[in-house]
Amino acid sequence: MDNTGSDFNKVYWLSQPPEVRALEINTTPDQDIRMSRGVELAVKGFKIDVPIMLWGWDPYKVMKLRLDYGYTWVPNALQPPVGAAPGLTGPGITPYDPNHPPGGAIKVSINLADFPPFDPPIPLPPSPAQQGPVGVSTLGNLYYSVPGETFLDGQKFSDARGTFLKHITITPFGRSPYWEKIA
């Protein structure tokens, strides 16, 4: 990904819990419905970013503007607003502290690494060829050796595909293990 707005927006929404993901404007275009669902989720403890999740604003543009103005965090929907923009000080003004966000605040970032997927990838079951030391066919009756397998030269292995004989050849490029299907 090149971290453009559209790439960021996909990653951003996939980093949210499914309940919050449903607030995405393309999923729930009606703002009244988004607002009521967003408030319900905020009360349940979900971090709701009002401009993005309730108003339907573009996540990349919102985060980029926040960064440009010096924000490192913003309050979630149920937290009090920031008292002063970053860098502003004066009598009676509580200055913005970029290094100490309150608990539950929303991190401001456009770094894709800061938005890991909420749903972990589903691991693929191993293919039959990867359940033993014999990998996939390379040429005719020759098969790759699975990385990390420890069979010795001349040992045999059988599985549903047949019986295989292990070969190890030493070449100028190093040790080269492979299997030959013998039955």
Image (cartoon, rainbow, N blue to C red):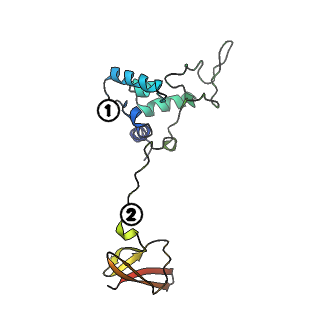
Residue 27's disc is: 1
Hey, what amino acid is under mark 1?
Thr
Can residue 173 be seen in the rendering of this structure? no
Please provide percent x and percent y for residue 3.
45, 43
Residue 149's disc is: none
Left or right: residue 172 compared with residue 180: right
**Image depth: mark 1 or mark 2 in front:** 2
Q: Earlier in the sequence, mark 1 or mark 2?
A: 1
Residue 126's disc is: 2
Please provide percent x and percent y for residue 170.
50, 85
In the image, farthest residue toward the right:
91
Please provide percent x and percent y for residue 39.
43, 22
State the separation of the CA atoms marked 1 and 2.
34 Å
Circle 2 SS class: loop
Left or right: residue 80 compared with residue 55: right
Q: Residue at x 55, y 29 (%)?
A: 105
Q: Residue at x 35, y 68 (%)?
A: 128
Q: Residue at x 42, y 44 (%)?
A: 119
Hey, what amino acid is under mark 2?
Pro
Please provide percent x and percent y for residue 114.
52, 41
Q: Residue at x 48, y 41 (%)?
A: 115
Are the residues at dot 1 and dot 2 in contact (C-beta closer than 8 Å)? no
- Name the image quarter holding residue 166: bottom left
- Name the image quarter holding residue 167: bottom left
